[in-house]
Amino acid sequence: MHSKRLKETDKPLKLEKQTINFLDCIAALGHFIEVIDAEGYYIYVSSNCTYDSTTAEELVGKHTTEAFNLTHDSSILINTLNSGKPYRNLHLKYKSNKTNKTHHFLYHSFPIISKNTIIGAITLYKHIDEVKRAINYIDTSNTLELINTESIISQKKNELFTFDDIICSSDAMMKTVKLAKRVSKSDSSVLIVGETGTGKELFAQSIHSFYKKKSQPFVAINCAAIPDALLESILFGVTKGSYTDAIDKQGLFEDAQNGTIFLDELQALSIEMQAKILRVLETKSVRRVGGNKDIPVNIRVISAMNTDPLTAIDEGKLKADLFYRIAVITLKITPLRERGLPALKLLTSNFIKHINDKLSTKIKHCSEDTFDVFQHYNFPGNCRELSHIIEHAANMMDEDEFFIEPYHLPYYINEFSTATYPQKRTSLNSELGDDEFKLGDYKAIHQKAVDEFNDKFNTEYLTFALNKCNGNISKVAREINISRQHLHGLISKYNIQV
């Protein structure tokens, strides 16, 4: 790397709004993200970076060595900044001085270069435990330097989901679970159809682990994550000499021998690749890239699609003969928005328990107002999105808050709620005339009165505080003894003009 360092006269790194929104979206998928300028000061920290009992806003403006008690030598970001060298797939161990808890991350950092000048650095990292959950999606040809194919398979034997991990209460989901348990006893091919985030792999692993194959390998791959040029060698293996430096290496079909292979997002494969997979299923054998020998394979194939298979066939994205081969049994998973409020509350409770264990928080549940918002939100990301929403809310809450309120939720959910489900509690008298007060309605009437008072109090008191402090958010937060995030949430919730 021959890039030069930024001079004082050069233009400093500044992130555009569009770039920040893009980084926020990546963080919403579960990544921690930090960006530093050429001097090592944070200019962006994703809002989920709260594992050291601090907030993202408190980190911005601090030097990376100051924020996490690091030195110039021990800070990977600073090393990236100084050397211009990227670091990939590092196992980073960090012990928090504030919580005394040790965190393990899979860490990547890259220099930010403009016109051959290093103007900053960016890091993306995840908790190792989360990476282990998804490790079966990694290209097994040593793309991840720390883990090889054998360790992937052996880990998955002990970490597979079971039907006990499927949290459901709706009739439709319980019928799907019952059917999945029944088909798990056979070796028939299964196609799982469901929107993104509904838990398709959860079902695939449960089917595998429920019956006789639970001690056999379970190998999974996301067909949309890897280009066809690489996918063929990953699935079918490579013969020595087939290309420069090629060595004999078995593919995922061989790795899954006597077990299960899970092909996620099957419709993302090219028609040519689908034809090759169809041949494997019909002949029950694979031929490695560059080889001339058919290798028998005894495997069960479970596939998944996040689109309707018949529509995919009509659009030319899925071979009809492959569909008939893989869809001997079809399971359709109901999207979260169709499962009803009891199922939503049950899942939320489960995610809250998980996040309390993960972040050492003490969240009790969501408020009724929050569930009111949830009921009118479509959850395009389904259960996975709900899990991330709960984690986001946990990071937004103060230590003395125990119920997730609407202002703790990601901004896009509140914007959706405001646009499609406007606040109704504007005036108690306008909603309920004197003749509508009935005996037995105390709780409902009392709640409406409390809500009306809260609306009036917060609007007037916060407007007063903002005027007193000339609109300075940080000063207001200090004066009224709440966090800036909480204050921002209240301002947004009550539509207060700053």
Image (cartoon, grey):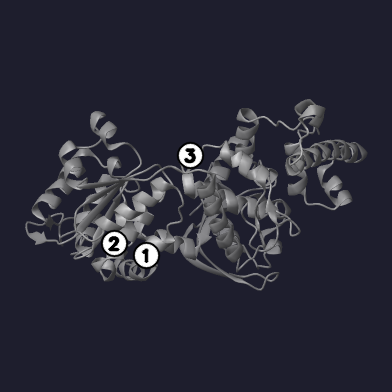
Q: What separation in Å lies between label 2 and label 3 (alpha carbons)? A: 27 Å
Type of residue at label 1?
Leu
- The structure residue drawn at horizontal position 40% and vertical position 51%, both measured from the top left corner, is 199
Q: Is residue 178 visible?
A: yes
Q: Is residue 221 visible?
A: no
Displayed quadrant of residue 114 = top right
- Which residue carries the number 1 mark? 160
Above or below 227: residue 154: below
Q: What separation in Å lies between label 3 and label 1 (alpha carbons)? A: 26 Å
> Alpha-carbon neighbours of circle 3 within 10 Å: few (<14), some, or many (≥20)?
some
Above or below 128: residue 431: above
- Which residue carries the number 2 mark? 208
- The structure residue drawn at horizontal position 21% and vertical position 52%, both measured from the top left corner, is 189
Which comes sooner in the sequence, label 3 or label 1? 1
Above or below 408: residue 69: below
Q: Nearer the viewer, residue 70 or 375?
A: 375
Disc number for residue 42: none
- Which residue carries the number 3 mark? 380
Report x, y in % for residue 3. Answer: 53, 50
The residue sitting at the front extreme is: 439
Secondary element type, mark 1 = loop
> Alpha-carbon neighbours of circle 2 within 10 Å: few (<14), some, or many (≥20)?
many
Which comes sooner in the sequence, label 2 or label 1? 1
